Amino acid sequence: MSFQEITPDTSVYMIAGFTVFFGMMAIYLVSLFFRWRILKRKLELLKNMEKRKNS
Amino acid sequence: METRPFGLRILDAVTVLLLIAATCMVFFYAPREAAMGEVQRLFYFHVAAAWVGMLGFVAAGAAGIVYLHTQHIIWDIIESAAVEISLVFFFIAILLGSIWARPIWNAWWTWDPRLTTAAILELIYIAYMMLRQGIEDPDRRARFGAVYTLVGVLSIPITFLSIRLFRTIHPVVIGTASEAARGMFGMTPPMKQTFFFCFFIFTVIFADLFWNRILLGNLSKKIDQLRYRLM
């Protein structure tokens, strides 16, 4: 009889964990990208309005 | 048109490459842990994400002190940037810990001192973000944020030391000689190298995101000023 422990198969949890990590990072990066784009558009619009106002 | 600095673009690229390297180390260099199996690999990212989370909350507290001293709005931008990034990383750390706990403790969550203090810490800073939204005057918002982060930072040592001060099932991996406190975590040299490499990489990721987020805050401030001039 062997008393050696068998390593449990926990690979499903590992895959779930790394999916959560990369998924969360991707969501945050996408949110940064879209916020950056929206703000840049707003800035352009306001700059044009200022130009029109001054001319 | 606002553009991102060249240095930041370089840092973005380096960060991506380093994250790929860290992921490869976790999967191919660090050996499989015998007692826990593959799920133990989450530990490298879990601890590193928690570290970055706490680093940002401390940075926010420091920025709060500087803001109260100088009254310069840039410190408010830095402070809110640090809190936002830390919230993401600390939430990731909590989720990874919970996923790791399911096969090891046979529970997704227990009201253990470490888990409870970590959840409270996350909620304190979620409340910070929500309360900031409710204040329109930028100076009042900045003052409130500075004082809040100064008080909030007190929860960092409580969370960090909770596994050392109280009886807990959460393993103490660093800075303990006790076998019992370490739980099943005995690290071989390749595991230690992967662990410290991930620590370093996550710090670089934090620096990169922090820079990006500060630029975003600056852009937002510029828009507010322009809008004010046009009114």
Image (cartoon, rainbow, N blue to C red):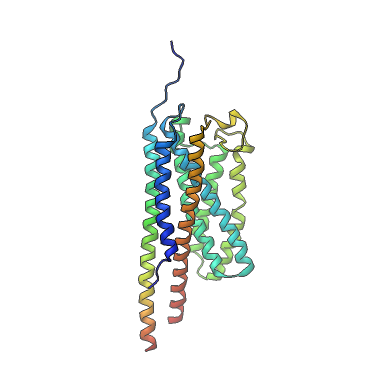
Position of residue B9 measured from the top left corner of the image (x, y, whole percent): 41, 61
Extreme residue toward the top, this view? A1
Question: Camera-side residue: B216 or B112?
Answer: B216
Extreme residue toward the bottom, this view? A55
Position of residue A4 measured from the top left corner of the image (x, y, whole percent): 45, 17
Position of residue B149 measured from the top left corner of the image (x, y, whole percent): 58, 57
- In the rendered image of this protein, does residue B221 appear above or below residue B107? below
Residue at horizontal 41 percent and vertical 32 percent from the top: B38
Residue at horizontal 51 percent and vertical 65 percent from the top: B77
Quadrant of the rendering where the N terminus of chain B is positioned: bottom left
- The quarter of the picture where residue B6 lies is bottom left
Is residue B161 toward the left or the right of residue B102 in the image? right
Can residue B231 be seen here? Answer: no
- In the rendered image of this protein, does residue A50 appear above or below residue B94? below
Residue at horizontal 37 percent and vertical 61 percent from the top: A33
- In the rendered image of this protein, does residue B226 appear above or below residue B193? below
- The quarter of the picture where residue A29 lies is bottom left
Can residue B20 be seen here? Answer: yes
- The quarter of the picture where residue B4 lies is bottom left
Question: Camera-side residue: B16 or B53?
Answer: B16
Quadrant of the rendering where the C terminus of chain B is positioned: bottom left
The number of discs equals 0
Residue at horizontal 42 percent and vertical 48 percent from the top: B19
Position of residue B216 measured from the top left corner of the image (x, y, whole percent): 44, 65
